[in-house]
Image (spheres, grey):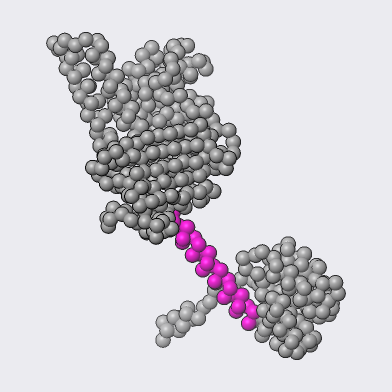
């Protein structure tokens, strides 16, 4: 029996309603005080004013859930005030109870036509007022629950769209995995072959090979490695989920990234041509726009049947008064007229079963619309399709493009530096030591060793990996801020780009330079020489 009693008490418990914010508008001081007191007696937070003008001003300054308004007042009467309140653009207006000495059916119609929810005839008995207020509270509670449900639905839809954008992006990478592997394996094949031949030529006894042949083999190996780095960088930019910052974007760089990823899909079906105009940078996000153009390029390739001769995919860019226009056209099958209006609908696809989710173009439309851009299609069956994307110009002058790695001369260092390299991968440390001949380079193969060396010795530069087992580069930096203050400006962090959320926040919060792996010897030497000039 005790258990039942406790259960019963638990079941009938209710969450207390929030305090109702109520405004009384009544020109008669005695009536105004009586109404306010009666409402406070049932727990309302009550303000009271003497006329319609003061009531409107109070409503504009503070949101109320319940208004108790007298009909007949000087200056602005109650019905006019009710009209004004309903004209205020708010998502959820207040519940309005009009108090009046009139009590005819026509008066009730006038009150409701003005936008009020209920009315009460004078003289007002306190019990009746409180009863009508309880009815109002129930209606307001229902409105509140409805509004909360709508807000929850909006949040759920936003989260669903976010997850489906990211899922489709990753699915796009997955569907292109074989092609990307092909793109990476080709340069890796001649990179490995050239390095093996060089190893044989430089072996003991050395094989006869001219200096020209060896330099050519080395050059091809470097080109192959740089090609792999570019493809990996394009994929990283494309698939990074947390980087949605809108900024000034070079359209041609984004298009080339998409072409690099989709090239294996394209090359077996069509010849790709580019017609790039002189265009300014646009408002966008590199990863999101790469997703859009990658989808359009792959769709263009899939619209062309394999084995057909003289098929083309073309990319065109040009500046317009209202932005930058990007066209991606193909000479493929085209889309039937009755289907054109549905191509941007979610889950609609003209591809065979298993070839697409029907989300790609819908997500592209959402990305472009979020950037205040436009996307549309012109198509004809048997003649191909042209997708046109209009993007807005960036508001501010974008920074100049950085010089490509390997371009321009590397000046000689002003003086030799004492450098500590911190990396748990031994070959990276040894490679940096060989690249920086002429400097005094020491290597720490972990965070604990790095802390000990920095606390015991002076270094001009610390090249520190971010992600390491046991003690990370972040922890090294944090520890030395306490034990060796002033060493922070000498840090340069090396990162492969595979950040944890903690690492990303850390790198965004510190002022230290970053060096993205894999970096070239030329990039490394430029950085070190720059630091040497500062001493």
Which quadrant would residue 183 be assigned to in this image? Answer: top left
Q: Which residues are magenta?
A: 135-163
Task: Give 321 or 64, whichever is nearer the viewer.
Answer: 321
Q: Residue at x 21, y 17 (%)?
A: 198
Is residue 64 found left or right of 389 in the rendered image?
A: right
Which quadrant would residue 91 be assigned to in this image? Answer: bottom right
Residue 206 drawn at (x, y percent): 16, 11
Question: In which quadrant is the N terminus drawn?
Answer: bottom left
Count of numbered marks: 0
Is residue 45 found left or right of 316 in the rendered image?
A: right
Which quadrant would residue 109 be assigned to in this image? Answer: bottom right
**Magenta region, main secondary structure:** helix
Residue 447 drawn at (x, y percent): 37, 31
Is residue 151 covered in magenta? yes
Could one spot residue 47 in this view of the protein? no
Q: Residue at x 43, y 46 (%)?
A: 387
Q: Is residue 42 above or below residue 287?
A: below
């Amino acid at each position: 029996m005790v258990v039942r009693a406790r259960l019963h008490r638990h079941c009938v418990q209710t969450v207390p309603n929030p305090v109702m914010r109520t405004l009384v508008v009544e020109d008669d001081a005695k009536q105004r005080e009586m109404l306010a007191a009666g409402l406070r007696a049932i727990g309302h937070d009550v303000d009271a004013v003497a006329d319609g003008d003061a009531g409107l001003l109070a409503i504009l300054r503070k949101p109320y859930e319940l208004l108790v308004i007298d009909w007949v007042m000087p200056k602005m009467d109650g019905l006019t005030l009710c009209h004004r309140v309903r004209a205020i653009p708010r998502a959820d207006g207040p519940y309005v109870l009009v108090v009046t000495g009139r009590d005819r059916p026509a008066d009730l119609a006038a009150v409701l036509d003005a936008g009020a929810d209920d009315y009460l005839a004078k003289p007002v008995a306190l019990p009746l007022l409180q009863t009508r207020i309880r009815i109002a509270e129930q209606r307001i509670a229902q409105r509140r629950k409805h509004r909360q449900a709508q807000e929850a639905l909006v949040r759920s839809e936003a989260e669903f769209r976010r997850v489906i954008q990211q899922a489709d992006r990753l699915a796009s990478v997955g569907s292109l995995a074989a092609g990307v592997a092909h793109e990476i394996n080709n340069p890796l094949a001649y990179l490995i072959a050239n390095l093996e031949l060089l190893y044989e030529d430089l072996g003991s006894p050395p094989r006869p090979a001219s200096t020209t042949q060896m330099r050519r083999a080395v050059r091809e190996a470097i080109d192959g490695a740089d090609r792999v780095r570019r493809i990996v960088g394009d994929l990283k930019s494309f698939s990074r989920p947390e980087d949605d910052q809108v900024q000034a974007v070079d359209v041609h760089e984004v298009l080339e990234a998409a072409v690099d990823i989709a090239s294996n899909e394209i090359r077996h079906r069509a010849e790709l041509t580019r017609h790039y105009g002189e265009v300014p940078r646009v408002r966008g996000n590199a990863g999101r726009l790469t997703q859009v153009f990658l989808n359009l390029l792959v769709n263009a390739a899939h619209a062309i049947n394999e084995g057909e001769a003289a098929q083309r995919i073309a990319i065109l860019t040009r500046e317009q008064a209202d932005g930058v226009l990007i066209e991606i056209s193909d000479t493929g099958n085209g889309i039937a007229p009755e289907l054109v209006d549905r191509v941007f609908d979610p889950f609609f696809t003209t591809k065979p079963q298993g070839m697409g989710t029907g989300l790609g173009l819908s997500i592209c439309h959402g990305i472009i619309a979020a950037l205040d851009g436009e996307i549309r299609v012109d198509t004809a069956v048997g003649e191909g399709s042209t997708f046109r994307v209009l993007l807005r110009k960036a508001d501010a002058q974008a920074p100049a493009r950085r010089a490509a790695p390997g371009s321009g001369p590397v000046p000689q260092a002003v003086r030799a530096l004492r450098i500590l390299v911190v990396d748990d991968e031994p070959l990276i440390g040894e490679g940096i030591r060989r690249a920086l001949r002429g400097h005094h380079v020491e290597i720490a193969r972990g965070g604990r060793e790095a802390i000990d060396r920095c606390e015991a010795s002076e270094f001009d530069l610390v090249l520190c990996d971010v992600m390491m087992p046991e003690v990370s580069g972040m922890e090294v930096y944090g520890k030395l801020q306490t034990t060796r203050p002033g060493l922070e400006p000498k840090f340069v962090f090396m990162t492969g780009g595979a950040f944890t959320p903690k690492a990303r926040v850390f790198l965004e919060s510190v002022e230290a330079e970053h060096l993205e792996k894999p970096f070239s010897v030329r990039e490394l030497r430029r950085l070190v020489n720059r630091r040497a000039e500062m001493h």
